[in-house]
């Protein structure tokens, strides 16, 4: 069985920290673990990430969607597939659920027509488990504002946008109840980490 785990949630939910803590724990248990992210998990993907998050550009929703999908196909083929074939655990910071939440739920795109495209971009690779870190929008926005690194184009979207993204994750979790685990992302990082470990044991 593949151990392909994605971490999802709105900006500021704490998923990147939780992904790293989970990787440390799995390595201590003797597993080979690859940590990676979307967008930006390949050399080409890093360039795509710059294009997507740079405030100089404001792509139309269709272009934005296609850039995220281009990043994903490249990443699946060159990074995720080989690691899974080597028998490693793959922990990926964001995957298709993010595209559903950000591009289909929060932007004015016709969802039904585009779902096959999201499916295509995964090249047949669906996470075996998804940790969705659920945090309310006010808390999450507060956390991103307190970060030292500069906020990117999507971090700076309005509260109503982040609320629509959160709704997108809720919908997605309802339609994929086996794969998507809802993690309460309130509390300190060790408390949240324990919730994740309890689900992985
Ligand atoms: P992320 O790396 O989580 O941001 P950071 O580490 O800077 O907080 O993700 C970058 C942004 O890309 C984030 O706002 C979510 C967005 N995104 C989409 O809109 N669609 C997608 O398919 C993916 C993978 C990310």
Image: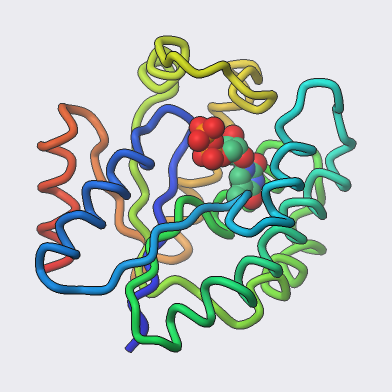
- Nearest the viewer among 62 and 49 is 49
Quarter of the image for residue 119 reads bottom right
**What residue appears at the point 44 percent right and 22 percent down from the top-left corner?**
137
Q: Residue 196, percent across and down? A: 19, 53
Asked if residue 88 is positioned above or below residue 47 in the image, the reply reads: below
| Side of 130 relative to 141 (left or right) | left
- Nearest the viewer among 185 and 115 is 185
Looking at the rendered image, the quarter that the N terminus falls into is: bottom left
**What residue appears at the point 14 percent right and 73 percent down from the top-left corner?**
30
Ligand 1 resides in the quarter of the picture at top right
Is any atom of residue 46 visible in this view?
Answer: yes
**What residue appears at the point 69 percent right and 54 percent down from the top-left corner?**
45
| Side of 99 relative to 86 (left or right) | right
Marker count (numbered): 0
- Image color mode: rainbow
Looking at the rendered image, the quarter that the C terminus falls into is: bottom left
Quarter of the image for residue 60 reads top right
Asked if residue 149 is positioned above or below residue 128 in the image, the reply reads: above
**What residue appears at the point 35 percent right and 68 percent down from the top-left corner?**
129
| Side of 135 relative to 150 (left or right) | left
- Nearest the viewer among 168 and 142 is 142
Q: Residue 49, percent across and down? A: 70, 43
Is any atom of residue 167 visible in this view?
Answer: no
Q: Residue 53, percent across and down? A: 71, 32
Quarter of the image for residue 117 reads bottom right
* Extreme residue toward the front, this view: 43
Q: Residue 14, percent across and down? A: 34, 34
């Amino acid at each position: 069985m593949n151990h392909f785990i994605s971490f999802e949630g709105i900006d500021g939910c704490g998923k990147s920290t939780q992904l790293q803590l989970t990787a440390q724990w799995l390595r201590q248990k003797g597993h080979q673990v690859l940590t990676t992210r979307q967008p930006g998990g390949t050399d080409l993907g890093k360039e795509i990430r710059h294009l997507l998050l740079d405030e100089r550009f404001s792509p139309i929703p269709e272009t934005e969607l296609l850039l995220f999908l281009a990043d994903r196909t490249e990443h699946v083929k060159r990074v995720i597939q080989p690691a899974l074939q080597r028998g490693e655990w793959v922990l990926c910071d964001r995957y298709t659920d993010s595209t559903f939440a950000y591009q289909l739920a929060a932007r004015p795109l016709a969802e039904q027509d585009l779902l096959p495209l999201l499916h295509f971009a995964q090249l047949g690779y669906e996470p075996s488990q998804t940790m969705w870190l659920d945090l309310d929008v006010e808390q999450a926005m507060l956390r991103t504002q307190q970060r030292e690194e500069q906020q990117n184009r999507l971090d700076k979207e309005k509260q109503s946008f982040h609320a629509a993204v959160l709704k997108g994750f809720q919908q997605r979790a309802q339609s994929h109840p086996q794969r998507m685990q809802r993690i309460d992302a309130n509390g300190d990082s060790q408390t949240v980490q324990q919730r994740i470990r309890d689900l992985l044991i």
